[in-house]
Structure formats: C-alpha cells, structure tokens
Amino acid sequence: MRSVLGSIMGGTTEFAGNFVPRDECVVSFFDSTVCVGTGRGVDEGRGPCACPLVHRSAHRGQAQGPLHTPRHPLSLRKDEELRQREAAFHMGSTVQEDILQQLEALHREAEAALAQANSSETTQAWHSEYLGRKGRLTGILRNLGSLAPEERPLVGKVANEIKVALEQALQERQAAIAQAELEAMRRAESVDVTLPGRPQTLGKLHITTRMLRDIYKIFAEMGFQVYESPEVETDEYNFQLLNMPPGHPARDMWDTFYTTTPGQLLRTHTSPGQVHAMRQYAPQPIRVIVPGKVYRYEQVTARSESMFYQVEGLAVGKHITFSDLKGVLMNYANQMYGEGREARFRKSYFPFTEPSVEMDIDCVICNRKGCPICKYTGWLEILGAGMVQPLVLQYNGYDPTEFSGFAFGMGPERMALQKYGIDDIRYFYSNDVRLLERV
Ligand SMILES: [Zn+2]
C-alpha cells in the first residue's frame, strides 16, 4: 500500500502545476505578466508589486506556464474530473501491477520450493502453504477487492494460470517422488534372485502304505476287491469259524491279546476277514483281499512286532484249483518283484487251508547267490497259501462239494524289509524320519 500511497502523492504533485487555488483563480484570468493592480509587468525585475491584491504566485514571479495561461472555469472542472479519473486509473493500475508482481514472485518461489520437496510429506506441506485454502495464493487473491471491477478478470486469469501451472508441477513432482520412493523401497527390499532357492522337503508315503498300494493295484487288475473287516474280533471269527475250535493246538501259533470282555480279542490275523466276506457274499463267487493291522502278544524284536500289517486273499468259486492259486501268485510275484522271477512252493500247515504251502521267490537282493537278507539260502519267503479247508467253506455258507477256493496271506512289512534291505522291523513304527528318507 505504501507504493499505492506514493503514487497518489505523486499524482497530486504531478498535477499541482495545473492546480489553481480557489482564491487566486480570478487572477489567472489576466495576463500573468501584468499586475492587475499596478499595470506593471511582474517579470520586469522591479521587485514585489505594490498592488493591494494578493496573488502570491504572480507577485513572487515564480508562477509559470499554466498558472499564467488564461483558463475558463468550465475547462478547470473538466481538468479536475480528468485528474481524478487518471488518479483513480493510476492508483488502480498500480495495485493491479503490484498484485501481478506478487503472483509472479509467488509463482517463482513456489516452483523453487517444489523443486526442493523430496517426499510425499513435504509436497503436502508445500500444497498447504501455496495452494491450500489458507495458502499464500489465496491470501494474495483476497486483495482483488481493492481492484476496479474491470481489472479483476486479468488478475484472476493470471492467478488461475499460476494455480494450474503449480498444480501441474505438483502432480509431476509427486509422480517423480512416488517413483523414487518405490525404487528406494524396491532396492531396500530386493532379493538376490541368483541365490539358490531353499530346497523343499517333499513328503513321502510310509513304506507300508506304498507296499499296500502296490499290492492293491496288482490284485485289482486280477479282479480282487479290497474288503475291510474289524480289528477287534470274536474268538468265533478269529478261530472257530477258521477250523480252530477251543482247545485246538494250532491256536498256539498265534499269541493273542484278549480283551476284558470274554470271547473278544484283537485279531491275530486278517483271516477272519475271509469269514466276513464269505458270510456276506455266499453263495456268490468271491475274489477279495483283506488288508489291515493285526496284533500279536509277542516279544518285540528286530524280526517281530506286536502290531503289523497283513494282506489276506481269498477266491471262492466253482472249479477253482491249485493251478489257479499258483497262477495268481506267480503273476503277483512277477509284477511286484519283476518279470522272470523263479518261485517255489513248500509244504506247510494252516488250520484253514488244505493243502497249505509257503511260497518263496529267488532272492531279489542277491539273485540266489546268498546274502544276509535271504540268510544265504538264495530264497525269500513271501507268503503262505493253500486251498480253503472244506470245513471253512461249509461253516461260512458254501457247499464244499460244489465250491472250492484258495487263500493266501502276506506281510507288507516283511516284503519291504526284503525289498529295501531294512534289517529291523521296529524302524517301521519308531517314527525315525531317516528311514523314510532312505527309501
Ligand atoms: Zn539274498
């Protein structure tokens, strides 16, 4: 405002030459070089005029130019209006110019400040300071009211252009900062992709499970279905219906866990599954395998566990012979242990089969040369089998004069011991991961 006031004072000074005091205006009607009172010229160098009229300018001889130019009163009024308009114009244009200069200065300062901003927080602070509702640009525009209405559009236009330019610059700066911050974060969190990855430990099925699935697959291709039966059995199903009445000496072959309920026990073999299957399907032909856990009240050693798996097999129908038994089991041995296996059947005894055999194959470890696995015999015992005892058929719904069948039983853990050369059956259930990693 100081400059505006200065302009006003200046304007007054500037027009003072044309200003004629009210009490002297009449003097100015006359030729300024001749005093009205004395008729003597005022510029004749003869000192102050002695006339009684007081007109200082003329008498001092200092008045020049317009003061001594004859002027008509109407002309003076027009000059006054012009002077006021020009003064007003001069004052307004100066304010406008001042605001424009402020805007331009603000523009330059804001651009410089923005160039220094290097984070999202500083750009936000910059926006508040320059473009916010209480920002400096708004502060300057509050002075628009001091402008003449016709002068406001220009200032408004310039202010708007500056605002748009600054907002554009802000966006560009913010984008650049965001990109830089992203790059910094990437560098900070970057990983060396050339490092070798951490090895993933893949789980494995338990050896017993794998053996069981191999057995299921081979027998399924020969038409045998998997048949499940209970692990807790009755004496009747575990012994009597398999041709072992109470007191039968063959029961001594199976040391048994009895429960506190009389006549109830943990099955010692999967053979009671044969009884369940026959009683369910008789007199239909049967081809089933019965896998599952069995329990023996025995000392746990490297060769024997108190719980282990068995897979029982049973085929019942008309005209089934020992040749069928051999054919099925040879096919199984070839698929499980490889084509071209040699096999031998040794006579054996089971109460529920007649005749009964043990089936051996040539040692898969040493090819009959002799090794610890085959106890240097060159042969591995893989299962027991036989033709179903006629009494067992009769007990369970089949006429033995019309039906015949064969049965077999094998131990998956023993097969795994042989196949993988494991020397202790206790590893199977001691949960030692080294065994699982080994095979
Ligand atoms: Zn061997």
Image (cartoon, rainbow, N blue to C red):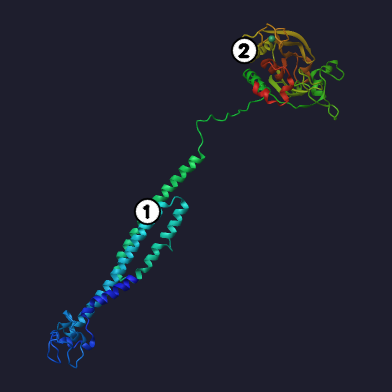
Q: Locate residue 316: give its quadrant.
A: top right
SS under mark 1: helix
Instruction: Please give the residue where the numbered disc 2 appears in the rendered image.
Output: 338
In the figure, 135 relative to 31: above or below? Answer: above
The residue at 30%/66% (across/down) is: 97
User: Which residue is outermost to the top?
Assistant: 369
Q: Nearer the viewer, residue 364 or 372?
A: 372
Is residue 56 shown left or right of residue 293? Answer: left
Residue position marked by numbered label 1 in the rendering: 168
Q: Amino acid at mark 1?
A: Gln
Quarter-of-image position of residue 268? top right
Q: Quadrant of residue 252?
A: top right
Quarter placement of the C terminus: top right
Spatial CA span between label 2 and label 1? 79 Å
Looking at the picture, how far across and down is residue 47, in whole percent? 17, 87
Of callouts 2 and 1, which one flags the residue occurring earlier in the amino acid sequence? 1
Q: Please name the amino acid that badge 2 sits on.
A: Gly
Q: Is residue 322 visible?
A: no
Q: Where in the figure is residue 169, as x and y percent of width and height?
A: 37, 53
Give the image location of residue 27, x and y in percent. Answer: 17, 88
In the picture, measured across the screen, residue 54 lies left or right of residue 313, that is: left
Q: Is mark 2 within 8 Å of ligand 1?
A: no
Q: From the viewer's perspective, is residue 405 above or below residue 142?
A: above
Query: Label 2's element?
Result: loop
Q: Residues within 10 Å of mark 1 (few under 14, many from 20)?
A: few
Q: Is residue 278 left or right of residue 7?
A: right
Residue 430 visible here: yes
Q: 335 or 152: nearer the eye?
A: 152
| Nearest the eye: 63 or 192 | 63
Residue located farthest toward the right when viewing the structure as drawn: 247
Q: Is residue 349 above or below residue 274?
A: above
Relative to 194, does residue 105 appear above or below in the rendering?
A: below
